[in-house]
Amino acid sequence: MVHKKDAREREHVDYYTAAVVEYTSINMIQPEKQWTVPDLMQANAEQFVKIIQNASHYDVDIIVFPECGLSGTPMPKKRAEIKPYLTSIPNPTDHVIPYKEPQNYAKVLTVLSKAAAESNMYVVVNMPERVKCPVGDFSTICNGIDTEYHYNTNVVFDRQGQIIAKYRKYNLFLEFGFDTTPRPELVTFDTDFGVTFGVFICFDILFRQPAVELVRQKNVTDFVFSAAWMSELPLLTAVTVHSSWAFSMDVNLLSSNLNKPAQYGGGSGIYAGRHGVQVAVMPQYTGSQLLISRVPKKNSPRPLRPAESRRHVVPIIPPPIHQQNQLRLLCDSSYSSFHSKPLECIQPNDKNTSTFSYSEPKHGFSCSIEVVWTNKDCNNNMPSYKMFGYAGERTFSGAKTCYIEVCGLSAVTNDAVGCGKIPDLYHSGVTIHSISINVSSSSGLNSIAVPITINSSVVPIHVTDYTFNNDGKSIQNIQMNLVKPSTDLITFAVYRLPQEVS
């Protein structure tokens, strides 16, 4: 293992070294095996240990694993069927180091606690938690339905293997066998390298609580984020939406995602706020990867230069040679309701200027778009670029109904067949020279707006290729401009994150 700096040195350098894991659960690698729940969770825990040991050779300070990484997916929907997955997790205030008391704690806890200590690393792991109903609890759960609560929980171990934080997911996504806390928990933990981290999980990132409140109430600048994210076009692909949240809030985000590309899952990265993507992967194949980068501390006087970032993508379970692209994407269920206007080619090779405007007086929302573009051949079967605007409701697979606002351009078709497909832009002959988007909103809602950019690799364009300006007055006026021509742009849009409809 590489020698680590002492605590005093770590606190005074202007970066820390982080790792996130794009992880494939062992039952996806060995689907023919009939896994029992204890065997599956223990096998994944042992894989985690190997990855932690691997990361230690890169002098990693903190590593993040994905949601459902230990338990695999799909998880059962019924409470009784979830029971075998659940683990009792000590409270951070108890100052427990599980591997030193193996007789008192589940094996997955003791194994991971020991790995954190032996590798001298902060470790963030997601696991299903059980909490016994306290005496006198007359809630719906404890008053007849069950004798314990079920939580989707992130656990944080420090360099000594002690549990120093745990966060219970508040915005559940089709997790019918799990419970939520009465109010969202604003969980943070401190490190010996002088950075305080906030914690949230997957679907939480789209909502104000707890993610935004951690920034606004507690001034948190760095986050650990575990996800089993399912990407959808034309707006909410994993690397794009996670990095755009970090960009809009100007925070560092360590994002680990469960790898299931054939089932819409995958996309991990380390994002440095307005400085953009440090390292990321949007996987085309089943397989685990370790992503490592130095991360500039937010109080650092200057950003790290690329040569200083020490970025690595380390295959853990590499895909088979000559494997076909497995990546599949969902379709935004509200996309067919968007008001839109296609780009219409008039003269090949001439610069065309297309404009679009949309307003929704009920919500005080308006947007305008101007696109300057060329097409080498007006008669080719180019992707159907459309300018669009929308202010209204959408559902997330029945989990929540929310209000959103969006304004932008996309090459994604809105028919049932084409919406979730990645457009083939290689032979399109289309160049988007510039885009200017102006959005005004007076709806008074408190969700944030983010810039959504997606290229043909299903990752965001570089942060220097566009500008995004928000006047900060309750998201009243937003301008977003493409400043570098692009031949592989799928989506360019302003997206106001969802506000749940009562």
Image (cartoon, helix red, strand yellow):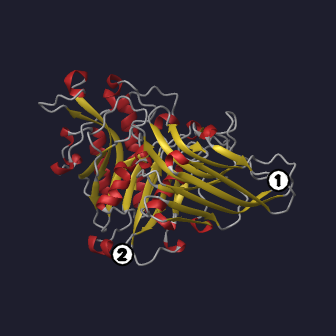
Where 462 sits versus 36, above or below?
below
Residue under numbered circle 2: 13
Where 59 sits versus 418, above or below?
below
Q: Residue at x 71, y 65 (%)?
A: 485
The amino acid type found where label 1 is placed reads Cys
Residue 480 lies left or right of residue 151; in this view the side is right
Locate the N terminus and report the quarter of the image it occupies. Answer: bottom left
Horizontal and vertical percent position of residue 393: 51, 39
Q: Nearer the viewer, mark 2 or mark 1?
A: 1
**For the residue labelled by badge 2, is the local secondary structure a helix, a strand or a loop?**
loop
The amino acid type found where label 2 is placed reads Val
Horizontal and vertical percent position of residue 72: 43, 36
Q: Residues within 10 Å of mark 2 (few under 14, many from 20)?
A: some
> Residue most toward the front?
361
Horizontal and vertical percent position of residue 434: 69, 64
Q: Nearer the viewer, residue 139 or 25?
A: 139
Horizontal and vertical percent position of residue 369: 66, 57
Q: Residue at x 27, y 74 (%)?
A: 8
Q: Are marks 2 and 1 in contact (CB under 8 Å)?
A: no
- Disc ID at residue 93: none
Residue 66 in view: no
> Residue most toward the top?
144
Where 445 sits versus 196, above or below?
above
Residue 155 in view: yes
First-in-chain label (2 vs 1): 2
**Whole-number angstrom distance, CA of label 2 to CA of label 1:** 54 Å
Q: Residues within 10 Å of mark 1 (few under 14, many from 20)?
A: many
- Disc ID at residue 345: 1
**For the residue labelled by badge 1, is the local secondary structure a helix, a strand or a loop?**
loop
